[in-house]
Image (cartoon, rainbow, N blue to C red):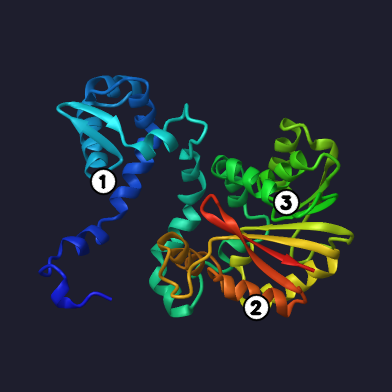
Amino acid sequence: MATISQQQSPNPERIFNAINAYEQTEAMKSAIELEIFTAIAEGNTAAATIAQRCGASERGVRTLCDFLTIHGFLLKEGVHYGLAPDSALFLDRHSPAYVGTAIDFLLTARLRKGHARLTEAVRRGGTALGEGTLERENPDWVKFARAMMPLVYKPSEIMAAELFKGGEAHKVLDIAAGHGIFGISVAKQNPSAQIYACDWKNVLAVAHRNAQTMGVDGRYHLLPGSALEQDFGGGYDLILITNFLHHFDPPTFTTFMRKVYAALIPGGRAAILELLPNPDRVSPPMAAAFSLMMLISTPAGDAYTFAELEHISQEAGFDRVELAPPEIGLDRLVVAHR
């Protein structure tokens, strides 16, 4: 940790930047809604032409683009704007890696309200919104399924390829399937695999449409309901648990993993995909900061370290728990072996 003598003279700028950080949220939301980044990618580089393309005022566009330049999302030379490399890849609607749809879920009213009541959540030790995002048939998860698939399309293929190294899958359970892309990618990698997707009924409608679009609906089966309550049946050689376990406290997590263990055949695998903070719980920044999202949105969820995932999985009966080498987008893959 740096000492005071190693730091620059105290300055309140960073404090005010943090207090006003919501301005970046709103600027990014507006730029995505107006298609500012796409307009620039199409060759509109001056405020006037960007404004014409986006149906906005020249003054408004200039002000917004200057703000985005200050924060590194745009580049500016004279009166002309360009896209920073990450903006060009992820925020141009024409890019196959476009992630702008994420605002439809990440900026839902429920999540914003949860953050607005952070002080209360800190005092409680959990969300100030009742069950938060865990409410039954929460329509926000439909938004998640529709909005977040572009972020994980390529990671899902990487994960499916990594799991294929451990052997072909035949009967696969996809828990909290959401958009369904993780199970669909496994189905594409394993031509004989039957996929059983578990999620709320309203969410599975999105997953089923994606399975139809991607040509695997003949092998795609729906298990509507709560993953904590649903009878999975048995005989699975692979169970996918993607970005799900962080919603729960360790006792609930352990009970659930015992249920997963029981549904697997001997030698079967549970593939856990999570943001993994380091043991210090402050690095890497995005994974570690995810704990705050769980605080404001769930009664007792958390971002778990690999050691915690390993311990709980072993408590549930799994013999061996491994951290797979590749990064799966922003996540890491943990494989628990029965």
Q: Quadrant of the N terminus?
A: bottom left
Q: Name the residue under label 3.
A: 165
Q: Which residue is drawn at 51% across and 53% down?
A: 330
Q: Secondary structure beneath disc 1?
A: loop
Task: Report the residue at 66% width, 66% height from top.
Answer: 322
Q: Quadrant of residue 316?
A: bottom right
User: Residue 333, how many percent across, how many down?
Assistant: 62, 59
Question: Which is more N-terminal, label 3 or label 1?
Answer: 1
Q: To which residue does mark 1 refer?
A: 71
- Up-down: is 77 above or below 53? below
- Mark 2 highlights which residue? 311
> Looking at the image, is mark 2 or mark 3 nearer the viewer?
3
Q: Which residue is rendered at x = 43% and y = 63% of the image?
A: 284
* Residue type, numbered disc 3: Lys
Residue 327 position, x and y percent, is 55, 54
Residue depicted at x 38% and y 73%: 119
Q: Do the residues labelled 1 and 2 touch (CB within 8 Å)?
A: no
Comparing marks 1 and 2, which lies closer to the viewer? 2
Are the two marked residues, 1 and 3, in contact with CB atoms closer than 8 angstroms? no
Identify the element where label 2 is drawn: helix
The quarter of the picture where residue 302 lies is bottom right
Q: Distance between the residues labelled 1 and 2?
A: 41 Å
The image shows residue 281, relative to residue 95, as above or below, that is: below
Q: In this view, does 240 lie above or below 262?
A: above
